[in-house]
Image (spheres, helix red, strand yellow):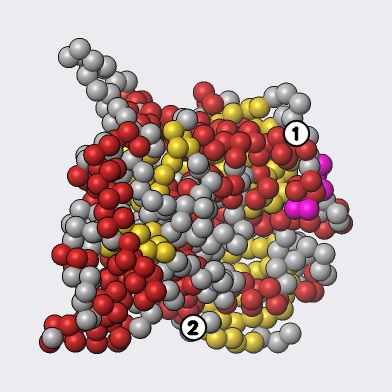
Amino acid sequence: MSKQTHAFQAEVAQLLHLVTHSLYSNKEIFLRELISNASDACDKLRFEALNNAALYEDAPELQVRLAYDKDAKTLTITDTGIGMSAQEAIDHLGTIAKSGTKDFMSRLSGDQKADAQLIGQFGVGFYSGFIVADKITVESRRAGLTPEEGVRWTSGGSGDFEVETLVLPQRGTRVILHLREDALDYANAWKLKDIVGKYSDHISLPIRMEKEEWKDGELIDPNDEKAGRKPGGMVKTGEWETINQASALWTRAKKDITPEQYQEFYKQISRDFEDALSWSHNRVEGSTEYTQLLYIPSKAPMDLYNRDKKAGIKLYVKRVFIMDDAEALMPTYLRWVKGVVDSADLPLNVSRELLQESRDVKAIRDGNTRRVLSMLEDLAKHDKEPEAKDGVTDVLSDEDKAKLGQYSKFYAEFGAVLKEGLGEDFGNQERIAKLLRFASTVSDTVSVSLADYKARMKEAQEAIYYITADTPAAARNSPQLEVFRKKGIEVLLMTDRVDEWALSFLHAFDGTPMQSVAKGAVDLGKLQDEAEKKAEEEAAEAFKPVLAKLKEALKDKAEDVRVTSRLVDSPACLVVKDDGGMSLQLARMLKAAGQKAPEVKPVLEVNPEHRLVRKLDGSVHFHDLAHILFDQALLAEGGMPDDPAAYVKRVNALLNS
């Protein structure tokens, strides 16, 4: 192939412009990204070679090498990994990672720190090389191709790149950075060793650099030693030394790993720039043996709610990398967990299909789930300072002080996804329920646990009351809460999209029934005295003729019309029958998502003490008033009338009458 010039994908050109204008606030990150890519290439070769050992050719050792040339102003990162064909170089280096390109560009804000967090997550770390280089040359040959099928890719980071064939005896990839004048300090052994020690020490492959030793300068006068010498300097010896630990971090003893090393390892596997909230590192022994290193992130990824995206933790078998997103090792509701599992029992040729059927994998999955829930329980336990007992407050350790507020931070990011576990993981449903937090009619913050609620329940209260709504304001101002406020009964406010679905699986907590205030007739049990019950029955009896006319007028909209005691200030509200039927809110959500939803006919409950309801009896505008009553109740709970124009017309007609 002769030299060819290709234009970058439009989004790449935009990205390169941002990169060359200091997108990263920390320039040295570029080396971590390129070493990480080199390590990934070696992992891919090791995996493909499980079925085709010939891919190793005559060089079975996998390694990464760093070389610099101060005179040529270059820094070169070489790996002996899988390499690229010419077409792969065009596809992978001219296009941002297969998916998410537009989302990536739309999320760039101009805030260097925030934008920097996105690059690794979208698989575009290669382009970070342009932070320090005004030109990048990539020379590569894919394992298994002939030496004549090598490729050279070159770009100055502007609008295009060049590709040409090249004879390369060795497989793998060499990335040559032609350093900018302001980045020449990266052609320095001490600087490179420092960066590798900080960001890439845990990589299981050896990262090697040519050894240097001090050499005195030559004599100024060869015949007179006293005349002094020219300045000495460090010179390369031709021997290559390993500059990282070159052992997988999870295989080391916990006592030998610092918190900083744990955090850097997290950032490398997650491509996150934020520290993890918490982690757990364990060797599990028994019928199934494996090592787990699991992390709880501090920030949710942008695709958290995409349940179809492959997510999971890295799987190794006997320290051999197998796959990146082993979703079978973690339930879907914990898809945000990052980490590594290294199994001693699984076969090296394990596939995604085999993972689904393996008994060992089920044991690992269950063990991972228990470990993550234990971490969350520990964070939740130490989220708030303990209350003083008899005027004495416990003295917290530094470790416990560091956990203060951490669970609240976690829950704000991942709480809605954790709720999915109520319907997916029945074996751990009780543990998950204890971890949930809500706002309530006595707490504006999302901090009330079900245990907190139970501890505050009134003496004769027989259920945990909750309401679901589209927004916090809609929940807090719902007319369905009026009688609960009047009697001082706390109601949990649930406004996440998943709440309605998730709570349908949680029928009780710690023996106490869960009761939606928007389903069924209100029944406060012993909290409602006999006089109130009698008054409600008498009102229903006296109001029978009006109820019959209302049912007839609204027969196409309402399944039933009845008198209620739940309303204090409002004339009417809508509820659904307490028979497991779908709520109006859930039906609206499904329709908005383009999914099929059954037609839900609500029950209209009216307040016989309200003036508007009393006006119905004998009114010449009965039909219009009935429809206004229904549509206003629909508006109050977040819905929209089927015919808004007809609603406005009716209201205007009554205002003018």
Q: Amino acid at mark 2?
A: Ala
Q: Nearer the viewer, residue 249 or 102?
A: 102
Secondary structure at badge 1 equals loop
Q: Nearer the viewer, residue 604 or 41?
A: 604
Image quadrant where residue 635 sits: bottom left
User: Residue placed at 42% from the left, 52% from the top?
Assistant: 520
Q: Which residues are magenta?
A: 347-353
Q: Which numbered disc, 1 or 2, marks the residue closer to the eye?
A: 1
**Quadrant location of the N terminus in the rendered image:** bottom right
Residue 352 drawn in magenta: yes
For residue 384, say whether it is visible.
no
User: Residue placed at 32% from the left, 29% from the top?
Assistant: 460
Magenta part mainly helix, strand or loop? loop
384 to the left or right of 231: left
Marking on residue 10: 2
Q: Is residue 636 above or below residue 187?
A: below
